[in-house]
Amino acid sequence: MESLVEVARLITTCTDCSLHLGRTNAVPGEGAQDAEIMLIGEGPGFHEDRLGRPFVGPAGQFLEELLASIGLKREQVFIANMVKCRPPQNRDPLPEELSACSKYLERQIELVDPLLIVTLGRFSLTRFFPGESISRARGRVRQRDGRSIFPIMHPAAALHRQEHRATIMEDFRAIPGVLEGLRERLRQLPEPVMPPVMEEAPPPEQLALF
C-alpha cells in the first residue's frame, strides 16, 4: 500500500470481514494527502454507504459547520473511519471488524502523517487509549506512539442530545491553538546534522621506473 489511492482501491474490494456482505459502497476516506489534521470517526452510516464518502449525512453537515468555524473546508483535512463498511442498522463495530480494518487506517495515518489526529467519538479514542472515557478525555491533546491525539465527541452526539452541541463546538474552537503549539514545537526542533561529504581521494600517482 504505497499510496492513498492504492489503499482506497484495496478497501473497495476488501472481503476480510463480514461487513462487505451488506455494503453498497465501501468508504475508504478522503481529503488532502498532506493534511495537518486527520479526523477519525467510527464507521459509515446510511448516506455514506450510498455515496461511498465519509460524513455526508446529518453528522457530516455538522462536521462541515465545525470545520468552517475554524476556517477550514473538508478538502483541507483528511477524514477517515475506524471501519470502512457500514455495520448493519448502524450497530457498533465488532472487535473482528475493527481488527480487519486496522491495517488500512494505520497505513492512511502513515501516508498522511498528520500533525494532529482528531478522534471523533469513543471508538476512535479507544484505538489510541483503550478503556478511556470520551467524557473525561475530550478536549485535551495527548501523545501516543509519536502522534498528537485530540479527542472530541462524535458530531452525531449533538444530533441526539442538543446539550452536546456546545461542548463539541467549544472543543473544535481549541484546534487552531493546538495546531499552532504543535507547529511551534516543530520549529524548535534542531535541524538534523548531515554527515560531511568525504571527497574521494585521487588515485596515487604511479612512479616511473626510469
Image (tube, rainbow, N blue to C red):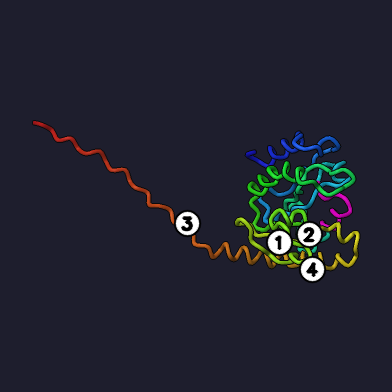
Tell me the residue that label 1 is attached to.
Answer: 150
- What residue type is disc 2 on? Leu
Element type at mark 1: strand
Q: Is residue 159 left or right of residue 7?
A: right
Is 122 colored magenta in this rendering? Answer: no
User: CA gap, disc 2 to disc 3?
Assistant: 34 Å
- What residue type is disc 4 on? Glu
Checking the image for residue 127, the label placed there is none
| Comes first in the chain, label 2 or label 3 | 2
Instruction: Mark 2: give few (<14), some (14-19) or many (20+) Cα within 10 Å.
Output: some
**Which stretch did the figure color magenta?**
54-63
Against 109, residue 7 (above or below) is: above
Q: Quadrant of residue 101?
A: top right
Say which of marks 3 and 1 sits in front.
1
| Comes first in the chain, label 2 or label 1 | 2
Q: Quadrant of residue 25?
A: top right
